[in-house]
Structures are given as structure tokens and as C-alpha cells.
Amino acid sequence: MRIRPATSAAQPRVLIIVQNLPVPFDRRVWLECRTLVESGYDVTVVCPQGEGTGPEQLVDGVRILAYRPYAPGGSALGFVVEYAYSFLATARLVLWARRHGRFAVMQACNPPDIFWPLARILRLPDGTRFVFDHHDLCPELFRSRFPDGRPALLEGLLFLERMTFRTADRVISTNDSYAAIARARGRKRPEHVTVVRTGPDPQQLRRREAKPGLRRARPHLVCYLGVMGPQDGVDIVLRAADVVVNQMGRKDVTFTLMGSGDCWGELVAERDRLGLTEVVEMPGRVSDEVVADVFSTADVGLSPDPLNPLNDVSTMNKTMEYMSFELPVVAFDLRETRVSAADAAVYVPPGDVEAYARAVVDLLDDPQARAEMGRRGRERVERTLAWEHQRRGYRAVFDELSGRDRAGSRTVRAGAEV
């Protein structure tokens, strides 16, 4: 394995650990990596390998060290085995990378909340500071996915979360709901918690020329992008498509559902059982180029996340990406979804599949409403949600912990670069 030699003190090393997605496929983490590199940091990422990638890459100045992923299944025991394997594989790569120079800051992204021991190991000889990038609420994720799960497993997740918060020098939360949990359940001081939303890059994510062939000879295209697990609501999309096509008799709509996950095979089988094979395309995980083509051609973006303890307080990245491409959104009425989308979405009572289907059809039949909601969504991204509005707060955390703000090197004060 080839690793770059240690860099100078003027270019502090940052280690970023991700377990649930490969980089650069993880859009939030990739935006963070690019921000740090552009700010003069030396960035190393440890993550699982993506499709067609090897154990080491250098992408846009970011060194990516990757291990072969292992996911034995979607059961609670399967997750325990997967996380134990991921921890050991990550620890091996972290210790290898450490041989070539100390890390000024280590960032761990969850789920899972298992990497705090590595932060403590690096802290002992090197004084490495620890940033917890709080992507998900693991206890709520467990409660949402396994409502009848063993209480001991839930207690274990709460312990891991508590230790992660306790070890972290700073917490970066994806929204205000998560920040409130970091302060209350995590007992973090308010000044040690920074909200950094997963804002899309409006320069990269913007509507371009449509590809009519993606509609598959039908007037309308409706799309979904995201993970396909038990808590993601893709089964609701299929049931809503069944209402639109087989009950309402609408033969003018194509559905394209992009993404993969534990439930992908079951969902494909359910699609076929419902007789939707010709109208619902499920290509699995696709490239950014395909996503952009589909979003630029589609009429409506779907955010079918059901109401549960996790989803109600979580920010859905797909919702903001739809908005970047001027797509109106159909979503269930969840707290943080309203914060993100505001009036760029139609909100349906949670769990009402028929109302969800009607909302989709109503938008398809009202091009003026679609255009206005799309305009509002794009404007909200550009003015408030875009990564350019989030990156300053993110970078400031690293400048403080690495001492660069005291050294006066491209620091951020009063919201401006100096």
C-alpha cells in the first residue's frame, strides 16, 4: 500500500472515517473533503470500497483508503457482525496511515457510533482532536427498523452514542433537531455543537437538457433516489404506483426508482407481483450522470420516508437534491422535511398511500404548480441550503481544533475569509 509521506505543519492532516457508504459516493462527506482540501488540509478517508474501486485512490487531492465491505444481512445480529468487521478493517487502515504522520483532527461519521476508541487511541500520543459528524440517530434507527428489538441492543446503542459524544471535542449536526439531541442526550455544551446541513452544490446539481427517452414513451416521469431499506418507504412508492396505474388507470406515467439497499430484491419482486414491471424501472445504484439525466427529465421527486422516531427529525438529502433540479416534491408531513422543503413540497398525512398517489397525480396534471414549486425549491437551495452557506461553519471547526485560526491561516472570522 502506498501512502504519501507526512506533510508539513502548515498542512495539517485530517482523517475522516465513514462506514455506511463509500467515498466519493457519500455526497455530504465528499463536500466536506473538498472543502478541507481547498482550505489547505491534507485529507485521508477510510471507508468501504465502492464498485469498481481498489484499496487506494487519490481523487481531487483526497487520499481514499478502502476495505472490502462485508454485510451479512439486515438482521440485528447481522449489523453487529458487520460493524465488528468494519471496526477492525478501519482500525488496520487508520494505524497504517498513522505511521506516515500524526493527524491533527479525526472525524468519524455515523452510523455506526463505534469509532470513538480510535479517537482515544490517536489522542494519547498525538493530541489528535475528535469531530463527530452526526449523520444519524442510531438508537432511533434501531427503534424504527426493529420496533420489537431486544432492549439490551438498544441500551448498547445508547452507550455507544454516549461514549461518542463524551469523546468528541466538537459535534457537527446535520440539523437543529440533531443539535438539540447532542446538547440534551449528549450533554454537549452549546458552543461545541455546530449545525452544518448537507446542502447541495447548486453549481453541480442543476437542471439541464431533458432526455425524453427516459420517460419510456410516456408523457410523465416520476423519480426516487436513495437507500432502499425497511425504513425508507420505497414500498410505499410501489403501493402508490399501484394506485396510480392500476386503480386510477393512469398509463401516462413512468416511475424510475434509483438506489439500492437491503430491501432492493424484495422490492423488485413486489413490483413484479403488482404488475408494474413495465412502468416502474429499478436500475439499482447508478452514476451521478444518470441521476442528473433523470432529474432533468422528471416532473416530480418522491420523498416517501414514513413517520418514525428517526425520519421525523432527520434531513433527507434527496429532498434537497430534487429541489436543486427544480423538481416539486411529494413527501409525508415530517418535521425536518418541512424545514428543508418549505413550500417546495406537497405534504401528505403520514401513512396515507392513496393521498400520496393523489398528490403525485395532482402535480402531474398541474404544470403551472409544478413550475412554481420547482422555482421556489431552487431559490431556497441557492439562498439558504447550498453547501456554500454551510462550508464556512464546517471549516471553522477544523481551523479552531487544528490551531489554524490562532495562526491566522485562511481563518474564518465574522463569517468572512481573511
Image (cartoon, helix red, strand yellow):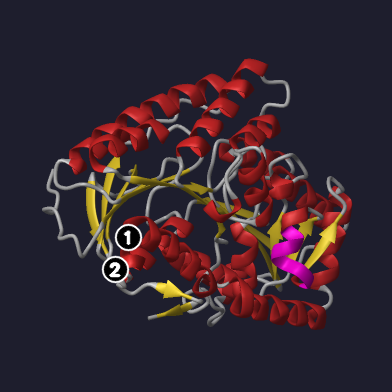
Please report the bounds of the magenta region as a residue range: 337-343
Camera-nearest residue between 154 and 103? 103
Image x and y of residue 308, in percent: 75, 40
Q: Are marks 1 and 2 in contact (CB under 8 Å)?
A: yes
Q: Residue 35's x, y, as percent?
A: 38, 67
**How many neighbours does mark 1 have within 10 angstroms: few (below 14), some (14-19), or many (20 or more)?**
some
| Residue occupied by mark 2 | 407
- Identify the residue at horizontal 56%, vertical 55% (top origin): 191
Do we see residue 276 in this rendering?
Answer: no
- Residue bearing mark 1: 403
**Position of the C terminus by quadrant:** bottom left
Quarter where residue 372 is shown: bottom right
For label 2, count other residues whose C-alpha is less than 10 Å away and answer few (under 14), some (14-19) or many (20+).
few
The amino acid pointed to by label 2 is Ala
Report how far apart the C-alphas of labels 1 and 2 lie in the structure: 6 Å
Q: What percent of the width, then of the height, locates residue 330?
A: 76, 62
Question: Which SS class for mark 1?
Answer: loop
Q: Is residue 236 above or below residue 244?
A: above
The disc placed on residue 352 is: none
Residue 174 visible in the shown view: yes
Note whether 163 is above or below 260 in the view shown.
above
Give the side of residue 364 with respect to residue 393, left or right.
Answer: right
In screen coordinates, is 379 left or right of 17?
right
- Asked whether 234 or 57 is in front, the reply is 57
